[in-house]
Image (cartoon, grey):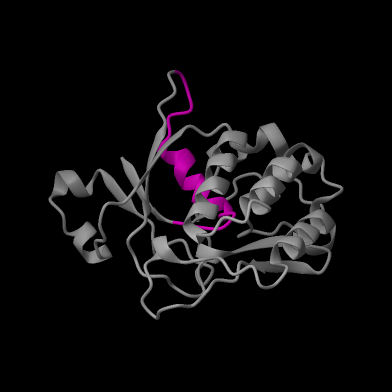
Amino acid sequence: MSLLLSTAYLPPLDYFAAIAKDASLEGEIAPARLVLEACENYRKQSWRNRCTILSASGRENLLVPIRHTSPHIPIREVEVDYSTPWVHLHENALSTAYGSSAFFEHYRDGLFDILESREVLLYDLNRRLLDYLLEKLHLPAVVEDSADYRPETDVLSEAAEEAASMLDLRTRLSPKKAPLYAVGEPYYQIFSSKFGFTEGLSVVDLLFNEGPDSLNVLAGMHVA
């Protein structure tokens, strides 16, 4: 089966749980097959240019500002706006929230190098971050861009054999909706003593806290 996913900035945990479910992680490894939606129009209030982390104040949203050049601009053409110091603000927020976590220093430089590369296009920035996260999570995946746009109804109405081979999660993974997958056994979070275990966070929350054990957590997640 292939997964049809929207591009996302430091995607949420269930984004990678879906990838882990599609990959064969036991015995002979078979990578997940991902198709990233490259032809849709940009959508506001989605994971495309935001993520959520857990800080000492609770849930904190990090937003990548974009240049609004057209109300119907294709996601592949959306430019990142660097007129504000958002990269510094995001790095500071991540350092403040996870600086004392067990694996922050291990992944910090690689992640920050990508943020500081000043990619012109949001899609390219997200793709570099996705590739980095898949590598560090040891999550095998083959990623390709969509060649054209198909509405969700078209995807669901394909011939049975073809529809069964494609799982469309473009609208099901959203900050407006509850997480699609839930953690089976809560992993360690720095501020869990203050807030309890918090769902719906960026996968960096898992990676900074659990490091090499992150893949086991993803593999153990289940449909919420």
Of all residues, the one furthest to the bottom in this rendering is: 71
Going 52% across and 74% down the picture, which residue do you hit? 67
Please indicate whether residue 53 sits to the left or right of residue 95 in the image.
left
Q: Which residues, given as a range, are shown in magenta?
A: 7-27
Instruction: Inspect the magenta stretch and tell me whether residue 15 lies in it.
Output: yes
Relative to 156, does residue 166 appear above or below in the rendering? above
Number of disc labels: 0
Q: Quadrant of residue 56?
A: bottom right
Provide residue 158's location: percent of width, then percent of height: 16, 54
Of residue 81 and residue 90, the one placed in the foreground of this image is 81
Q: Residue at x 64, y 58 (%)?
A: 201
Q: Nearer the viewer, residue 211 or 43?
A: 43
Q: Is residue 72 above or below residue 91?
A: below
Q: Is residue 88 magenta?
A: no
**Residue sitting at the far right:** 100
Residue lying at the far top of the rendered structure: 27
Point out the image quarter for the N terminus: top left
- Give coordinates of residue 125: x percent, y percent: 55, 54
Between 79 and 35, the residue placed more toward the observer is: 79
Q: Which residue is at 64% across, 51% downward? A: 117
106 vs 80: above or below: above
Task: Examine the rendering and report whether any part of residue 186 can be seen.
Answer: no
Q: Position of residue 137 (x, y in %)?
A: 60, 36
Q: Residue furthest left?
A: 159
Query: Is residue 85 at least partly visible in the picture?
Result: yes
Q: Residue at x 34, y 65 (%)?
A: 40
Residue 133, how many percent across, how many down?
Answer: 59, 42
**Relative horizontal placement of residue 217, taking residue 15 as reference (left or right):** right
In the rendered view, would you say 141 is above or below 26? Answer: below
